[in-house]
Amino acid sequence: MLFGSLCGVFSRIALVRIGKLDGRSGDLLHLFGQCGNLFAVGIGSNYSLRPSLNVRIDYEYQRWNGFPPNGLSPEVFSFGVAYHFH
């Protein structure tokens, strides 16, 4: 789910994700052996260089419960460029 507000050529982005890892199916059973809840929060910014060219940077913190012994906590930084064809 993304929420944003436009401020001139900048837009701010807040990110919230919630999910569930089901380790009862397929190969995940012998790797993890259980289910776990996942959640992530993040922030970012979208900058419009031109009407058809945007640059985005964002940061996301994730928490994956259910991975022994204390879960996983990856932190993700991403950068991207998007071009809109008219």
Image (cartoon, rainbow, N blue to C red):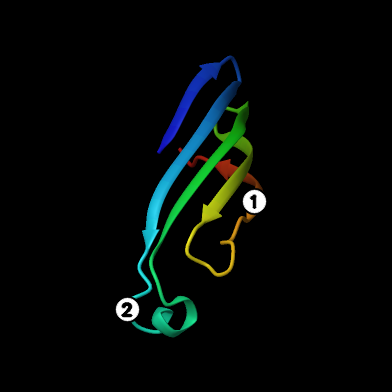
* Residue 82, image x, y percentages: 57, 43
The residue indicated by pointer 2 is 25
Q: Position of residue 68 (x, y in %)?
A: 55, 70
Residue 46 vs residue 71, the one in the foreground: 71
- Badge 2 crowding class, 10 Å Cα cut-off, few under 14, some 14 to 19, many 20 or more, is few
Going by the numbered disc 2, the residue's amino acid type is: Ser
Instruction: Left or right? Give the position of 80 relative to 63.
Output: right
| Image quadrant in which the C terminus is located | top left
Q: Residue furthest top?
A: 8
Measuring from the top left, give residue 29's x and y in whole percent: 39, 81
Measure how far apart labels 1 and 2 are at the Cα level. Answer: 27 Å
Most extreme residue toward the left is: 25
Instruction: Say the numbered circle drawn on residue 76.
Output: 1
Under mark 1, the amino acid is: Val
Comes first in the chain, label 1 or label 2: 2
The answer to whether 26 is drawn above or below residue 2 in the figure is below
Q: Which sits in the foreground, 60 or 72?
A: 72
Q: What residue appears at the point 65 percent right and 51 percent down from the top-left corner? A: 75
**CB under 8 Å between discs 1 and 2:** no
Left or right position of 79 against 18 = right
Q: Nearer the viewer, residue 22 or 57?
A: 22
Taking the spot 58% from the left edge, 68% from the top edge, the residue there is 69
Residue 11: x, y in percent? 56, 24
> Quick one: SS at disc 1?
strand
